[in-house]
Image (cartoon, rainbow, N blue to C red):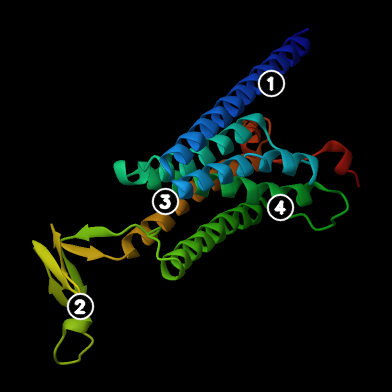
Amino acid sequence: MKKKQVKRKIKKAIKETSKTKLTVYVLLRLLVIISMVMQFIKGNYGNAFLCILTLVLFLIPAFVNQKLKIELPNLLETIVYLFIFSAEILGEVQNFYGLFAEWDTMLHTINGFLCGAIGFSLIDILNQNERFHIKLTPAFVVLVSFCFSMTIGVLWEFFEYGADMLLAKDMQKDRIIQSFNSVKLNETGENIPIEVKDIEYTVVVTKTKDVKIDGGYLDIGLRDTMKDLLVNFIGASVFSIIGYLYIKNRDDYRFAENFIPRLRRSHFKS
C-alpha cells in the first residue's frame, strides 16, 4: 500500500514539474519574441539577432531529446531555459551584466554546476552499461565530471578572449582597480615587482584624444577571467560532491537525478 502511495506521489510530482517546465518555456519564448520586436523597432539589429539566437538555443533540449535520445530531467531543462534567457536577453540585451556587478558571476557559477552534471552523466551512463567491462570508482567518475566542467569553462574564456581580440568586443569585462604589481616598472630590469597603489585616476593618451579613467587603473579582462574560472570551479566542486554521494548511495540522494541527463531506456540495453 505504501509503495503505491509513493508511486502516486512521484507521478504527481513529475506531472507538476512538467507543467512548470512547459509554462516557463512558453513564457520565456513569448518574452523573447516581444523583446525581438522591440529591438527591431528601435533599430538595434544586433540585439534583435541575439533574440533570434536565444530562440534557436531554446530548441537544444528538444534536439538532445529527439536526436540524441537523451532525456533531460524537467528541473534541469527548466534551469537551462532560464540560464539561456538570463545570459542572452537579460544579460546582453537588457545589460544586466553592466547593471548588476555579480550577474556574470552568478551565471558562471551555475554553468560550472550544470556542466558538472552533464560530464557526470556522460561517464556514469557508460559506467552502468553492461557492455563495458571496466567499472570506474565513484572518485574517478566525479573527477571526470569536474574536469569536464572546468574544460568547458576554459573553452568559454578562450571564446571571450577571441571575440574581444578579433571582433573588438568586451566580453571579458574590464575592472577599475586601485593597485597592481609589475616587474615592467622595475628600472633595473630585475624580476622584482614594483607596487603601485592608491591610484586615483589614470590618463590614456592617444593620437586623437586623451581618455581619463577616474577611480583607478583599468584592468583589461584578467581579473574577470580569473573570477569566472574560480566560480566555475566552485559550481563544479558542488556538483562533484553531490555526484559522489549519489553514486555511493543512489536511494538517499535521488534529488541529484533532477540534474543528471539519462539515455532513454530503449537505448540502454546491453
Check disc 2 and report the residue beneath it.
207
Residue 42: x, y in percent? 41, 40
Above or below 207: residue 91: above
Label 1 vs label 4, nearer the camera: 1
Q: Is residue 166 left or right of residue 248?
A: left
From mark 4 to mark 2, how far is it between C-alphas? 56 Å
Q: Amino acid at mark 2?
A: Lys
SS for tag 4? helix
Q: Amino acid at mark 4?
A: Ile
What is the quadrant of the N terminus in the image?
top right
Viewer-side label of 2, 3:
2
Percent of width and height locating residue 5: 73, 9
Give the Cα distance between marks 1 and 2: 64 Å
Query: What residue is shown with label 3?
Result: 231
Q: Amino acid at mark 3?
A: Val
The 10 Å Cα crowd at callout 1, few under 14, some 14 to 19, many 20 or more, is: some
